[in-house]
Image: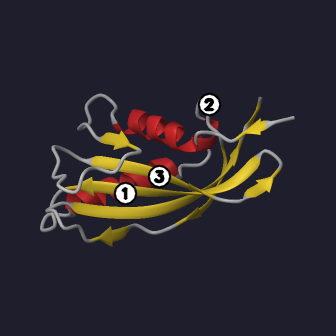
Amino acid sequence: MRVLPPDLELWLCTYLRNELNRPGRPSVEVSNKEPGKDYTGPGPLVVIRCDGGPADDYGQWLWQVGVSVLAGTRQDDQPANDLGRQVMAILTEWPEIATAAGSPVTKVSAIGGITAIREKQDIARRYMTIEYQVIGSAT
């Protein structure tokens, strides 16, 4: 039987976008594409990147995901700090992330801290890593 790995990046982007952009909350863009080198807004941006990882078992993988949060400015980085903590809470909330519709996540395996990354442009970036155990689907 052939097992297709999940499109974890797409699923996480959709899940996070839906969780962050609920009625009454400020809009946050969620993407799997890094912005151009001159990006300065218009608003907060979260970029999710799946770095892959080893197969843990037949049809299961242990994949690391990198998450960048861009918000605020270098001098006013509190929006990036606040959004970073919110993003981490959503992407590691157990068991909600595993029981959400269509979720390929079977376990949150490891969580890396939120790190400040210096940008050339006047925007604050926070970066974190999360490791998930994910399951594929039979084709």
51 left or right of 78 in image: right
Task: Pick whichever, 107 or 29, lies toward us.
Answer: 29
Q: Which residue is mark 1?
A: 68
Q: Amino acid at mark 2?
A: Gly
Q: Earlier in the sequence, mark 3 or mark 2?
A: 3
Q: Secondary structure at mark 2?
A: loop
Mark nearest the camera among 1 and 3 is 3
Question: Percent x, y for residue 39?
Answer: 19, 52
Q: Are marks 1 and 3 in contact (CB under 8 Å)?
A: yes
Q: Earlier in the sequence, mark 1 or mark 3?
A: 3
Question: Percent x, y for residue 78?
Answer: 21, 62
Q: Which residue is mark 2?
A: 102
Q: Residue sitting at 83 percent across and 48 percent down?
A: 58
Q: Residue sitting at 25 percent across and 71 percent down?
A: 118
Q: Residue sitting at 32 percent across and 55 percent down?
A: 69
134 left or right of 29 in image: right
Local packing at callout 3 (Cα closer than 10 Å; few below 14, some 14-19, many 20+) is: many
For residue 49, the mark is: 3
Q: Residue sitting at 25 percent across and 31 percent down?
A: 24
